[in-house]
Structures are given as C-alpha cells and as structure tokens.
Amino acid sequence: MELTIEVVVFAVFAIITLAGALGVVLARNLFRAALLLLVSLFGVAGLFVLLAAPFLAAVQVLLYMGGIAILIIFGVMLTRGMVQARQVMNSQWDLAAVIALVTFVILMIVIVQVAQGEGAPLPSLPRGDVAADSIAQLGAALVDPAQYVLPFEVASVLLAGALIGAVYIAREDEAE
Amino acid sequence: MVKDALIQAGMNIGWATFIDLLLGVIVAASFGMVWVLLGIWIERKWAGRFQNRIGPNRVGPYGSIQSVADALKLLTKEVIIPRNADRPVYFLAPVLVVASVILIAAVIPFSPVVIGTDLSIGILYVMAVSSIGAIGIMMAGWGSNNKYALLGAFRVVAQLISYEVPTVLSAMIPVMIAGTLSMQGLVHGQHVWFIVSAPVAAVLFFIASQAELGRAPFDLLEAESELVAGFNIEYSGMAFAMFYLAEFMHSFFVAILFSVLFLGGWRGPGAEQIPFLGIVYLFIKSILVYFVSVWLRLTVPRVRIDQLLNLNWKFLVPLAMIYVIFMAFVLKIAPVPDLSGAQAIAAGPYEGVASGIYRLLGPDFVATLPQAGVLLLANVLFVVVAAAVLREVSRRRRMRVEDLVDETDYSGAGGAGGYTPADHSETAAAR
Amino acid sequence: MIPLWMFLVVGAALFAIGVFGVLARRNAIAILMSIELMLNAVNINLVAFWRYLTPETMSGQAFAIFVFVVAVAEAAVGLALIVAIYRRRQSVVAEDMNVLKW
C-alpha cells in the first residue's frame, strides 16, 4: 500500500485510540485513566473524520470531552481514596486476558474470512461519495416518520429517565 | 499557492495539501498570539478610563508595548512546580487550555476568501473545541496537588458545563435561520443581521458566552477577593501566562463569534468585491462587541455561585429551550424567502422604483426584510410574554416570602432556639 | 484510500481491550470506562460500514447517535449508582458489592 497522508493519519489515530484504551485498562491512577479515556475517544473522533462523518466527530468531542469525561472525573473525585489503588486488577485478570484475546482472535477470524470470502467481500473503496448536505439529511432522517422518529423519541425519553434517575440515586439523603 | 508550488515540485497531492493546511494553521494561530499583545493594552487602557485612571503609560508611546514587557517578564520568571504535582498532567493543562482557544481560529471567516477551513460543521466545531478547555482546567486543578486549586477547578467546571447549554441553544437560532452549520454559510445567509431577526438569541448568547469566558460578573473562577486565585494558584511564569493568554484570546474570539453569528460577520458595503474590507468590518464589529463585554466586566459586581447557577438553570436554559421551539414555529410561518426573483429584477433593465430600491440596497437585503420584520415582531412578542410570566412568578414568590414574614412572631425571636425571619424567608424563596 | 478491514481491526482491538477492562479491573469506575471503550468500538464499526457500504442513506450515523445516547445514559446512571454505593460502603471495588451474592 502506498504511504499517502491518509494512511499516516489513519495510523496515528488508530494508535492514539488503542494506546489510550490500553492506558485506560492498565493505569494505576484512576484520574489518569479518565484522561487516557479522553485520548482514546479523541482518536475515535479522528477516525470518524476519516470516515467522512465530521458531525459525529464533533458530537463525539462535545459529548465525551465536555460531558461524559467531566462526569467520570467528578465520579472519581467523589469516590476519593479510591483514586490510587494498591491492587488494580482482580484475581481473575489472567482469565480475563485470555477471554479478551479469544474475543479479538474470533473477531479477526471473522474479518479475515469475510474479507476473503467469495459472496460479498469487504470493499477497499467506499461506495460513492457522501452527499454534501449529509448533516441536513441526518437531521431529517432522525425526525422522519418513515425512518427514525420513533427510536429518536424513545432515546429522548430514555435520556430524561436516566438523568432524573441518576439525580435521585446520587442525591444525599436530606432527612438526617 | 504553496500547494501548487509543492505539487509542481513533484510532491504527492495529499502531502502538499497537508503542508498547505499546516502553514495555514501556523498563520491562524500566530494571529491570535500577536493580537493578544495589542488587545491587552487596549483593554487596560479602557479599564483605566473606566476607573478614572490613565492605565499603562510607561513603556512605549502611550504605554503601547507594556504587554510586550509583561510577556518578557513572565517568560524570564521561574516556573515553580509544586512538590508531588502530577507532572505530565500539570504541564499539559495550560497547553490544552490554550489549544482549545486557538483551535477556534481555524473556522473564523475573516472575509469571503480568508478562512482557515470552512468546515461543514463550523459552529458545532467551535462548541466542541471550546469544551476541551474544561478538561484542561480540571487537569490544572488536579495536577497542582493543591486542594484550593482542585476546589477552584470544580467551581469553574460546574460553571462552564452549565453555561454551555444556553450558549449552544442560542447559537442554534442563526443556524436555524441560515439553514447551515458552516461559518461562511452563516455569514452568507445573513442578508439582514441576525441581531435584528433574533435579538433574544443574541442577548442570550452574549450573557451565556460571558459566563463561559469566566469574566466578571461571572469571574468566580478567579474571584481574587474570595479565592486565592482559583484553579491556577500553583502556576507561575510562562505556565500562568498561558492561562492568561487563553482567557484573553477566548474573550476576543467570542466577540468575533458574536459578530459572525449576529452582526453579519465580514458583511458590509463592498466587502464582497474587496476581501480586505471584510477583515476591517469584522474587526470593527468585534471590537465593538468586545468593548461592551469589557464595559460589563468593569461595571457589574460579581455574582454568587448560587446566583450564577440559578440564573443558568432556572432562567437561561428554560428560556432558551422555549425560544428554540418558538423560533422553529415562527420560521415555519415566515420561511427564508426565495431571493432569485429579486436578484433577477436587480440584474435586469431599470424598470420603475422597485428595481431602483433593489439596486441601491442590494436585492438580497430588500427581499429578506419582510421575513426579518416578522421574526423581529415574533421576538418582541416573546419578550413581552416572557416578561409577563417572570413578573407573575416573582410576584408570587415575593408574596410567599411576605406572608411568611407576617406570620412570624417576632416577640419570641432572638431566643436560643429561635429562628431569624431572614433564614425562614430565604428557605421559602429557595423552594 | 484505507480499506474497510483496517477500521474493523481497530474496532475489534478496541472492543477486546474494553472486554479485558470490564473483566479484570477492580474499580467500578474503571469498569464503566471500559464499557465506554466497547461502545466506541461498536460506533467505529457502525460508521465504517455506513461509509463503505451505504453512504447514500443515513442509517449508520443515526445508529451511532443512538449509541451516543445510550452511552450518556449509562454513564450518568452508572456513576450515580457508584457514588451512592460509595457513600454507603466507602468502596467502589466491584468485588466488595456482594450483598446479592451467595
């Protein structure tokens, strides 16, 4: 394969993603794990840009950096004393490593098989370009009764329910 | 230009584009840095006038290179690192904060042709990038290994996250009217300035973005008279200067952003023909907006943290949400007009008064006026209704407080177990 | 252009790392973060398939957005639970949460 700028960018983002992810699961310090999670998710946002989905990339950064990461960091701080653990892994970590490895190998086998299969092999080139107004299309698709309006509404109800529930659970008992 | 030269020199197109973009990034980033030196001087001069002082007047003519002297001083100062600081986090924090601000410059349309890159998600990109700053502040608070820094960081992050909601919601309104997220598209869609079509959004955006910046009256992150210094207490020398730089640049970029969203960006007489005029117009508008923000900063006293959060969650967020829905309906009633007819009349032969007006004021502007008028009326209606609701709510709240005060038997108060009426009314108001 | 399988490999690796984190970490917040990694691995695959197979419809991106929503809901509720448990038991180690265990 030719070493185009695209390949280099892809490699950089893939390495950022995977190295960050490894950092998350291996880091001793929980705060650093949260920061590495951000690094990893930033890499994923980069991959989205390469996949011609800039809207998702921006939402990824806005949502994870501005939302979930801050939430997790607040969670880390609220459970202080747990930030620096003596023992990071539990007793079955070796088994877990085997399971994770097996998962990866199985997924790889599937990918290799499909990539070389006769029926519909994985394309190496995308089918056509993304429409210039893809963001407008996405917005319309989400509120189109023929497409995703029902899942969209259900998702919004789920969010509202989850957030109210979260506030209720995490609230300190006032009657004391 | 660079790109063509590189391609002619036999370079791969992809790499040539990359280097071209990289140069653009360096230019755009340096613009911010250089502007800061001048801008800080201007702001200090204004502050001096506001407070009946002269302001910096020692270094250079009218003190104009005072900022350079300050920057040199900060550069030569020792950077003191607290013991047990989380070093990588501690040093990455200011970098991240500055980067989050400089990255905004990439999508600012300075003129019809001068723009870093006209992303199709322009304004969303701005919001996403500026949310990285909160992480930087959190890292600064944590990395310093200082409880006051950490507490300061918590306050800042609570403020930034909260005010992101009304900022994004009010920035949605121009997007809805122009029908695009791209910054250049927002400017092109603004035949009549959006501050006329959507004044409520402009005011909401201005207030919320001032709080995002963390400048007075929302400067709880620094609050030098209450906290020692907030999250950046352990930073000194250049590391501190970077936070300062980021804050200043951010406030100016927000002024530019306001001009782009609501004041027509680079639009102005002759801007499309002579791109340089566009830069001048944008700067004049931004400086005006910036002046208002400095004016506010130097005049209004600081709010308390509970007032700050109440203002956001109980006032700005509900108002912005209702406003977005309201504007969506209004835009259905008064959609963006089709401009081709007016353009044809203006381009065609001279026939009567109509084509004269079109030529004089520009066909797009005149053809959009009726829609802008309807939107403006709708906004006025919205403000009237909102004010009536607010008056009613606060009247009820006040009555409840007054009732409580009347019921209280003052004769027994002052004893050991007695409560003060003030306490009671405050809890009632909080409910 | 990058072939589709390279994105899938990144997705698979990210998912496997997430699986390891969920199974091996003791701290419940770390487990939550690993779940976020797995959700992101799914998102990479969704968007990659969308880009290479059906770029003319918006299905892949729409599903990715629903995954975002689920991720946010999960993070909010999960962290609320962890904070509540920490108040009660002064621990966020998953092994210590054993009241329902027999």
Image: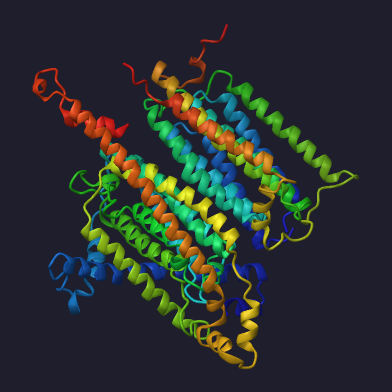
Residue B260: x percent and y percent? 46, 68
Could you tell me which residue is drawn at 42 percent across and 68 percent down? B259
The answer to which quarter of the image holds residue B277 is bottom left
The answer to which quarter of the image holds residue B393 is top left
Observer able to see residue B146: no
Q: Nearer the viewer, residue B204 or B1?
A: B204
Could you tell me which residue is drawn at 47 percent across and 73 percent down? B110
Could you tell me which residue is drawn at 63 percent across and 85 percent down? B345
Residue A94: x percent and y percent? 61, 23
Could you tell me which residue is drawn at 17 percent across and 67 percent down? B48
The answer to which quarter of the image holds residue B431 is top left
Residue A90, above or below B88: above
Residue B7, above or below B208: below
Observer able to see residue C68: yes
Q: Quadrant of the N terminus of chain B?
A: bottom right
Residue B15, above or below A41: below
